[in-house]
Amino acid sequence: MSFLKIANVSKSFASTQVLNDINIDIAEGEFVVLVGPSGCGKSTLLNTIAGLENVTAGQIEIAGQDVTHTVPADRDIAMVFQSYALYPNMTVEKNITFALEMRGMSAEAQRKACAEVSEVLQISHLLKRKPGQLSGGQRQRVAMGRALVRNPQVFLFDEPLSNLDAKLRVDMRTEIKQLHAKLGTTIVYVTHDQIEAMTLANRIAVMNGGIIQQLGTPDDIYNRPANLFVASFMGSPSMNILDVTLAQKKTGVEVTLPNGDKFTLADSNIDLKSLKDGQVKMGIRPESIMEKAPASSKDFATLNQLIDVVEPSGSDTFVIFQLGETTMNARFAGDSTVKSGEKIKFHLDLRRVHFFDPETGDRL
Ligand SMILES: Nc1ncnc2c1ncn2[C@@H]1O[C@H](COP(=O)(O)OP(=O)(O)O)[C@@H](O)[C@H]1O
Ligand SMILES: [Mg+2]
């Protein structure tokens, strides 16, 4: 049974439609991440869940209650924003307990609740400070503490880590994941960062242009992207996308690459009859193009190509080469010794190629 149900939600600002028929059923305790490029409607969707924006159409239920027209204060949710929005003149403790005081909780109960969340967030030593005396990461913790202390049914996070530097962002990401494992609260988390989405989510909703492009587990989204948008958006460096031609042969589906090289997929279940002329988009991720492969394995196609650029990143070596007009990126091991200008063998893992309809972009 779904705990947070978003049913047929649409939202327009004047004549501009920002959300288009959004449907997500979220189970109790689930961590769902909304990810997509800037302006795709993530914050607007989160705000409709919070009640900060009205929906134009559709319905929102929390724990079996229709809250579509309920004010934010009565929805039992807590939100953490990118701008921490702490009260600058209040101490950390006061920032955390303010909402409890508003509810009329006794001073003793407030102190106890504050002590508990400060312990979880490791900010007990900061309670007497003002926000101006804290680092960015500490302020972010206080903002989370303020949400946690209310013990809500649902947490909403809107890009909570975007203002932190790279290292702290990674540390806080881990802490949020640990926190979720410990508390088991339902979370809807917005980010434009696909790594954050992959690492945190039980399920990811990839959005673009106010539409959910795909809703699935990180494994679904990464390994079985529903369309070209999801394929290109998730993964860094991006999936390589090539124009290829498919033809049915006795031994399987023959794929002709942009440079004229061909290989055959023995057990492909693509329905070629639905394609006009066999022209499709093929996707292959950088890590599926390898420097080494088992000798003469039928699962690999070998290309002989000149290396244009080698980009060592420490843990990986990115190797850029041309295939016809298409610039390709391959991810080799960090200790690879290949050099630009060298002609080498690239091994394409045929178990990990994706095909898309060039017109609709849909996965074939
Ligand atoms: N109050 C508003 N009035 C008019 N347009 C808005 C308003 N809020 C957001 N928008 C527009 O809605 C679209 C989605 O915005 P938003 O939900 O903030 O995107 P995201 O969080 O994914 O970056 C954007 O094109 C934005 O300009
Ligand atoms: Mg936003």
Image (spheres, rainbow, N blue to C red):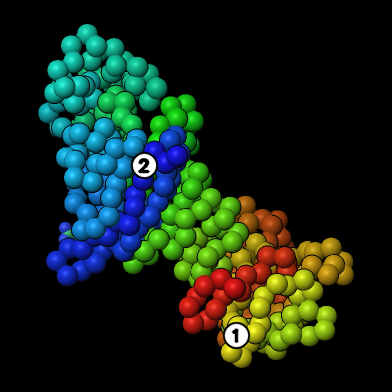
Name the amino acid, label 1: Leu
Q: CA distance from mark 2 to mark 1?
A: 40 Å
Q: Is residue 120 above or below residue 192?
A: above
Out of 167 and 266, give the one closest to the viewer: 266
**Secondary structure at numbered mark 1:** loop
Position in image of residue 275 (x %, y %): 60, 85
- Can the viewer see residue 257 in this picture? no
Q: Is residue 250 left or right of residue 103?
A: right
Position in image of residue 277 (x %, y %): 61, 91
User: Which residue is depicted at the point 47% across and 60% down?
Assistant: 214
Q: Is residue 260 left or right of residue 146?
A: right
**Secondary structure at numbered mark 2:** strand
Q: Earlier in the sequence, mark 2 or mark 1?
A: 2
Name the amino acid, label 2: Leu
| Number of the label disc, if any, that sits on residue 275 | 1
The quarter of the picture where residue 144 lies is top left
